[in-house]
Amino acid sequence: MGRLSVVDEIFLRGHRGLGTPSALQGLWRTADPVDRRLLERIHTSLRTGPLGRRVIRSRVPGARPHWRRNDAAHPLRIADGAIASANLLSWADDQGHDLDPEYGPGWRLSAAALREGGSVVVLTCSHALTDGRGLALAVDHALSGAPVTEYPALRSDWSDARGQWATVLSGTVRALRHGAPERPGPVAPRSAAELPSAGAVLQFPAADWDLAATGRGGTSNSLFLTVMSRLLWDSGFPDPRIQAAVPVDTRNDRRVDNDMAMTEVAVELTDTPATLREKCRTAYESGISAPAGMPPELLQVLPSRVAHQLSRGAGERDILCSNIGSLPTALTRLGPHHCTGVAARAIHPGLAPTALPRTRLSGYLCRIGHDYTLALVSLDPDRIESPRALGDLARAAFDRLQIPVTLW
């Protein structure tokens, strides 16, 4: 299997307390109970699929860690009793603990019956294993057998180390010709007395959302940035400018990994979907990198703590706007069960309330069939103190757009 990328290792360090711990989740709601035998078959397909791997570190200085097949998995977890729909997301939050892409299984499949009828199925995996698009491809593979791209043949550790050091040294020399880059300033983590769960999932018609976007001279993505920024300002965020981090999918094949770049957009109070459309177009031509001006591979040849200090907070801005795009049609069904809603999001298991990242609000937008879902995760307990408060803010924003919305 292949070797870890710079982004993979950033997320891996998060599991070790160096940065923000992150796990991805895909969530499916069905109108009727899902049979355990079907869930066990899906679990087996995932275990033998592209998520079934773990990190192996090299003893050769400069060689990147690589992936090795690992068919060990956390057991299928089914809740003992039915849970209330109001508690769905807090229950899903608890599925992210004990994921370890290096020493243990990095993913978990869970399910629960809902008291109001139907069920919820949740796949949670370490962000070191893949990004949101990659997670969708892994599930598509498990459900339909759709092919995924295999990693290229693995070079030897010595060969990889030579390539890494050559890239780092030549890139560093080129960077220093333009003067020594500024040392990254200290990133002061935010803190709170406690970190209550504040998440929400909104489901709404794709036709209404797209019409609202084009009617304002924008796109689905620029309307997404508009809504996310407005939610943060409505919560009481005091600054007239919001810095938005925007992940961009860079894959050109069906590979299950972190194949993305991060860019940023500065959102002003006067911005509209039309003006943000142009800002996004410009932003896509450049990305956020760390350490500034230096080859990113430098982070892979340095000790973990040094690499963390050089990259700390690199992809964090006031808000995160992750547009995952259209999901494969196979995700609309779990065997014979039609899914009434599908969502994707990231959670942060083990995040200490005394070490909150700069990011205050994250949004994960995806489309499946005739609907969009927007999963919101708040990391600003001082201004958004509960899931209900977050849901109220979101409903008010959609009312202004005249888009009907359903909260999970």
Image: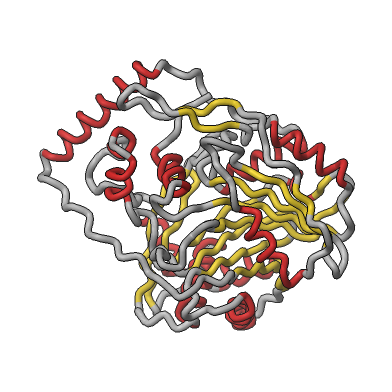
Which of the colour schemes (rainbow, by chain, secondary structure, one colour) is used?
A: secondary structure
Q: Residue at x 42, y 42 (%)?
A: 7
For this rendering, which residue is in front, 36 or 165?
36
Q: Is residue 47 above or below residue 404?
A: above
Q: Is residue 278 visible?
A: no
Locate residue 184: give its quadrant: bottom left
- The total number of labels drawn is 0
For this rendering, which residue is in front, 168 or 369?
168
Q: Residue at x 67, y 76 (%)?
A: 403
Residue 297 spot, x, y in % from top left: 31, 35
Q: Is residue 355 above or below residue 133?
A: below
Location of the C terminus (image quadrant): bottom right
Q: Is residue 227 above or below residue 91?
A: below
Residue 167 spot, x, y in % from top left: 27, 28
Q: Residue at x 72, y 69 (%)?
A: 87
| 320 to the left or right of 71 | left
Q: Is residue 166 visible?
A: yes
For this rendering, which residue is in front, 308 or 74?
74
Q: Residue at x 88, y 56 (%)?
A: 33
Residue 203 spot, x, y in % from top left: 70, 67
| 121 to the left or right of 73 | right
| 168 to the left or right of 85 | left
For this rendering, which residue is in front, 5 or 402?
5
| 269 to the left or right of 123 | left
